[in-house]
Image (spheres, helix red, strand yellow):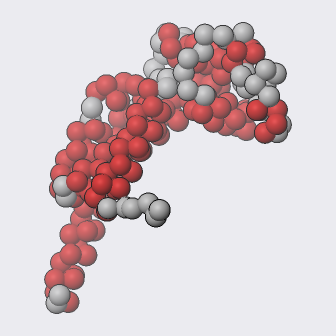
């Protein structure tokens, strides 16, 4: 390839990188604008339940305490929430960040940390949508897919609550991304 073609390719790459950053900034704006919309009234029933559980569970000091499920203070079943059916990883991450930032937990503290984390998980999903579409098709399609994902009303709405939906979406898209990479790159497992 000629130096002129290399320069053109670098310019095109930079253009798509800038577009992606702008899409992510737009997506972040949509997800974070008005994030305290309910002014701590906790009107969303799932969010209210999750901040309640997050307030009741307590961080543990060691892995052995965590794996002692019958006695672990991180286990919602041990804290009066036997009907907790959501994933625990986002809850644990949120609870530990709340403890780190505030030193204690409460409904408002859980919402203050949980909502931005939910928005971040969804923003990472937008990035994964781009990466999947760019790998399957090209960067133009990837940008278009990311724009649609960044502006999707349901994704934006879910990002304004501390619920598990955005976290589930993120991990689902992460699995799809790796499946696409495996399929496109012909990874093989040595026998």
Residue beneath the point at 16% across and 83% down? 5
Residue 89 figure quarter? top right
Relative image position of residue 109 (x, y in whole percent): 65, 25
Relative image position of residue 54 (x, y in whole percent): 66, 22
Residue beneath the point at 65% across and 32% down? 92
Q: Residue furthest bottom?
A: 2
Answer above or below: position of 147 versus 156: below
- Residue 75 shows up from this direction: yes
- Residue 40 shows up from this direction: no
Total marks placed: 0
Answer above or below: position of 38 versus 172: above
Residue beneath the point at 47% across and 33% down? 167
Relative image position of residue 113 (x, y in whole percent): 59, 32
Answer above or below: position of 27 versus 110: below
Q: Nearer the viewer, residue 87 or 147?
A: 87
Q: Nearer the viewer, residue 102 or 3?
A: 3
Q: Nearer the viewer, residue 153 or 189?
A: 189
Instruction: Please give left or right for residue 122 compared with residue 39 in the image.
Output: left
Residue beneath the point at 45% across and 31% down? 168
Instruction: Please give left or right for residue 186 compared with residue 139 in the image.
Output: right
Specify the quadrant that holds the N terminus.
Answer: bottom left
């Amino acid at each position: 390839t000629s130096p002129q073609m290399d320069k053109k390719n670098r310019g095109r790459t930079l253009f798509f990188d800038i577009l992606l950053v702008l899409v992510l900034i737009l997506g972040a704006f949509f997800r974070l604008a008005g994030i305290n919309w309910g002014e701590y009234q906790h009107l969303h029933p799932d969010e209210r339940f999750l901040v309640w559980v997050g307030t009741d569970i307590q961080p543990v000091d060691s892995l052995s305490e965590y794996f002692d499920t019958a006695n672990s203070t991180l286990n919602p079943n041990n804290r009066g929430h036997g009907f907790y059916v959501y994933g625990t990883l986002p809850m644990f991450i949120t609870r530990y960040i709340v403890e780190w930032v505030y030193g204690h937990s409460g409904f408002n503290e859980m919402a203050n940390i949980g909502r931005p984390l939910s928005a971040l998980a969804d923003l990472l999903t937008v990035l994964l949508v781009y990466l999947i579409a760019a790998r399957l098709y090209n960067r133009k399609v990837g940008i278009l897919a990311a724009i649609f994902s960044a502006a999707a009303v349901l994704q934006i709405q879910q990002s304004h609550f501390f619920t598990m939906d955005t976290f589930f979406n993120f991990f689902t898209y992460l699995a799809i991304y790796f499946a696409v990479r495996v399929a496109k790159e012909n990874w093989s497992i040595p026998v």
